[in-house]
Image: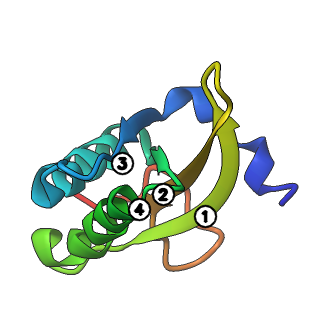
Amino acid sequence: WEAFNTRDFEKTGRLFAMPASPVPKLAWAAVAEVRRAGAVSLHCYSDNKDAVNTLLKALATVPRLTGGQRFVCVPSFGRAGPKKEPVLRVYAERYRKDSASKPDDPDLE
């Protein structure tokens, strides 16, 4: 966790999944953000099973859309907004073949 928390989470875009979010569009948006910044943060309300389903389907769709490239995902639960509603956050970054790889490796290019 120590190494994970050294990341600059402000540099990554945030995508919000809703039940009606088109899965392929959400997947492509995630790919585009990972290509741009090396990572993306996907969010949804964790008490909405349809939104969670959409978010996870989008992540599972990435290899099919990109010819096999993969993300490494780290999920976390928290609360957001003035009502402190429960949210699922999934931090996704490009898969690197070894831990010594630099973030700018062209795995998703």
Identity of the residue furthest to the right in this view = 2
Mark 3 residue crowding within 10 angstroms, few (<14) / some (14–19) / many (20+): many
- Residue of label 3: 34
In 3D space, how far apart are the residues under numbered discs 4 and 1 (Cα atoms)?
14 Å
N-term mark: 3 or 4: 3
The residue that appears at 59% across and 26% down in the rendered structure is 10
Q: Position of residue 87 (x, y in %)?
A: 58, 47
Mark 1 is on which residue type?
Val
| Contact (Cβ within 8 Å) of mark 3 with mark 2 | yes
Mark 3 is on which residue type?
Val
The residue that appears at 23% across and 76% down in the rendered structure is 63
- Residue of label 4: 52
Q: Is residue 52 left or right of residue 60?
A: right
- Residue of label 2: 92
- Residue of label 1: 74
Mark 4 residue crowding within 10 angstroms, few (<14) / some (14–19) / many (20+): many
Mark 4 is on which residue type?
Val
| Contact (Cβ within 8 Å) of mark 3 with mark 4 | no
